[in-house]
Image: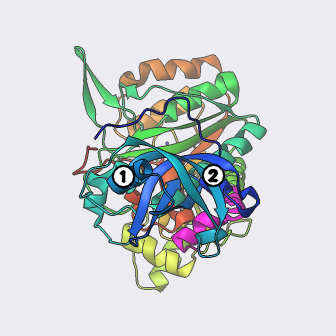
């Protein structure tokens, strides 16, 4: 079939702007075709765009045959431009519909589609991710990404208001930063290189120049496991600030998580309704429990851990049952925290995790700013300081004391949307089995 050009047509209204007050007015709408119903003498088409949907109604008797044949040719999800008149109609959704006077078919969708974007027929996650471009047209998916966007913009605005500047650090790197998380090697000319696990070392160095920095960017983790909360490429909101301690950045983290909840609750009521998710803004200040207290609470419940162990998933689940909501775990053993973490006494670190239920949302802390201490910690962690020579140089130029955190944007979005699988809140997730689409 011959497709039409957009030509000089431009959208005059979005679908949600079609209201009774426009009765009689000519409009140009653009969008994708949803449900088509043919009742013999009358044809209904639901036109979807990013703002919502509107009904297009054509009676066979009164409509130009050219328009009717175009309507007959349309398939679900095709993209169209429709010129028509707004008409009040008691039967129509929202009491208003558009009667077409000209239709341009911009692109036709083939049939059958691999999944039903109206969501009426449910498809499994793998099928949906295989056809993600189409799957993202579901109203639930659009709601999730609008909420993600709302949260991110709120966080950006808050950090900028606190004089943080946004930076972009390299994602092709030469060394690891996070103990425990494996690296993806890449072929980089004649050298060995990796995808960055975290902007950690760069953001620390940048505090020397810019004092307060933040970055929203990808982190790559070669985790083998397949879980509903891990991906191999995630998005992290990292901050780092000079002349601050763990306690100071915990307050910033608390404020920005609180604001993300609050702004989603206030600005995304429609989206939350689509997702059927009731969002409860956590009360400030978020409770803080020490690692020792967490171990004691867990052992009371029969979950016994050795001091110095990281909290395994079952322990996090149990702790979530006991504490719940948003809470910090502070004073971790140095053994489980990365080499750059500032010690607190002999065995502890001035570091924290922010939990939401059983999900770790963020981790951070005060950092070491003395080269001597950093080298000592590297050696204790079995790292070779020679591999960090270019980084260590920065500690010879009077790097200020600093602190920061990394907040997982995907995990925060899970909490804000009620998604149970991290793949739902990431456009094109990368996991152990999936690198396409
Ligand atoms: P960490 O390794 O704890 O800390 O990562 C910070 C946050 O990033 C998110 N995250 C992930 N999300 C999804 N899938 C993954 N595989 C994954 N890995 C991490 C989590 C986590 O809390 N440099 C430190 C941060 C700092 O101290 O500033 C770091 O990378 O939400």
The answer to whether any part of residue 166 appears in the image is: yes
Q: Which mark is residue 187?
A: none
Q: Where is residue 49 in the image (x, y as percent from the top left)?
A: 53, 52
Magenta segment: 257-277
Q: Residue 150 carries which label?
A: 2
Residue at 40%, 68% (x, y): give it: 37
Instruction: Check the image and report above or below for 133 versus 37.
Output: above
Q: Which of 303 and 117 is in front in this view?
A: 117
Q: How is the image coloured?
A: rainbow
Instruction: Verify whether residue 259 appears in magenta.
Output: yes
The yes-or-no answer for disc 1 within 8 Å of ligand 1 is no
Gap in angstroms between the C-alphas marked 2 and 1 = 42 Å
Q: Nearer the viewer, residue 291 or 233?
A: 233
Q: What element carries label 1?
A: helix
Which residue is under mark 1? Answer: 69
Q: Where is residue 130 in the image (x, y as percent from the top left)?
A: 26, 52
The answer to whether any part of residue 226 appears in the image is: no
Q: Position of residue 271 (x, y in %)?
A: 59, 64
Q: Where is residue 24 in the image (x, y as percent from the top left)?
A: 70, 55
Q: Quadrant of the C terminus?
A: top left
Mark 1: give few (<14), some (14-19) or many (20+) Cα within 10 Å: few
């Amino acid at each position: 079939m011959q497709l039409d050009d957009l030509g000089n047509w431009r959208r005059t209204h979005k679908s949600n702007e079609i209201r009774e007050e426009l009765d009689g007015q000519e409009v140009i709408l653009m969008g994708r075709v949803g449900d088509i119903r043919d009742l013999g003498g009358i044809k209904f088409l639901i036109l979807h765009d990013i703002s919502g949907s509107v009904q297009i109604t054509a009676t066979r008797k009164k409509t130009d045959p050219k328009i009717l044949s175009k309507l007959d040719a349309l398939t679900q999800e095709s993209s169209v431009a429709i010129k028509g008149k707004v008409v009040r109609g008691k039967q129509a959704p929202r009491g208003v519909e558009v009667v077409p006077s000209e239709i341009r078919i911009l692109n036709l969708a083939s049939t059958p589609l691999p999944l039903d974007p109206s969501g009426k027929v449910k498809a499994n996650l793998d099928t949906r991710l295989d056809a993600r471009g189409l799957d993202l047209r579901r109203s639930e998916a659009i709601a999730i990404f609008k909420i993600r966007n709302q949260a991110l913009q709120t966080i950006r605005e808050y950090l900028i208001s606190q004089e943080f500047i946004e930076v972009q650090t390299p994602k092709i790197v030469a060394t690891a930063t996070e103990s425990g998380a494996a690296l993806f090697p890449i072929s980089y000319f004649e050298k060995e290189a990796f995808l960055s696990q975290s902007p950690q070392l760069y953001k620390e160095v940048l505090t020397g120049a810019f004092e307060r920095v933040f970055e929203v960017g990808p982190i790559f983790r070669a985790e083998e496991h397949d879980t509903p909360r891990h991906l191999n490429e995630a998005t992290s909101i990292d901050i780092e600030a000079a002349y601050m301690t763990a306690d100071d950045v915990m307050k910033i983290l608390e404020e920005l998580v609180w604001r993300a909840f609050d702004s989603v609750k206030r600005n995304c009521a429609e989206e939350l309704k689509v997702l059927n998710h009731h969002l409860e803004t956590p009360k400030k200040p978020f409770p803080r429990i020490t690692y020792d207290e967490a171990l004691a609470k867990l052992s009371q419940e029969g979950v016994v851990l050795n001091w110095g162990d990281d909290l395994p998933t079952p322990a996090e689940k149990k702790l979530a049952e006991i504490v719940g909501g948003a809470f910090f775990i502070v004073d971790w053993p140095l053994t489980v925290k990365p080499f750059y973490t500032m010690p607190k006494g002999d065995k502890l670190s001035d570091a924290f995790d922010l939990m939401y239920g059983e999900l770790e949302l963020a981790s951070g802390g005060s950092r070491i700013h003395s080269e001597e201490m950093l080298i000592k910690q590297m050696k204790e962690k079995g790292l070779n300081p020679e591999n960090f020579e270019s980084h260590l140089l920065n500690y010879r130029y009077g790097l200020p004391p600093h602190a920061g955190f990394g907040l997982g944007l995907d995990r925060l979005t899970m909490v804000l949307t009620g998604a149970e699988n991290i793949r739902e809140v990431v456009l094109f997730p990368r996991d152990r089995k999936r690198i396409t689409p």
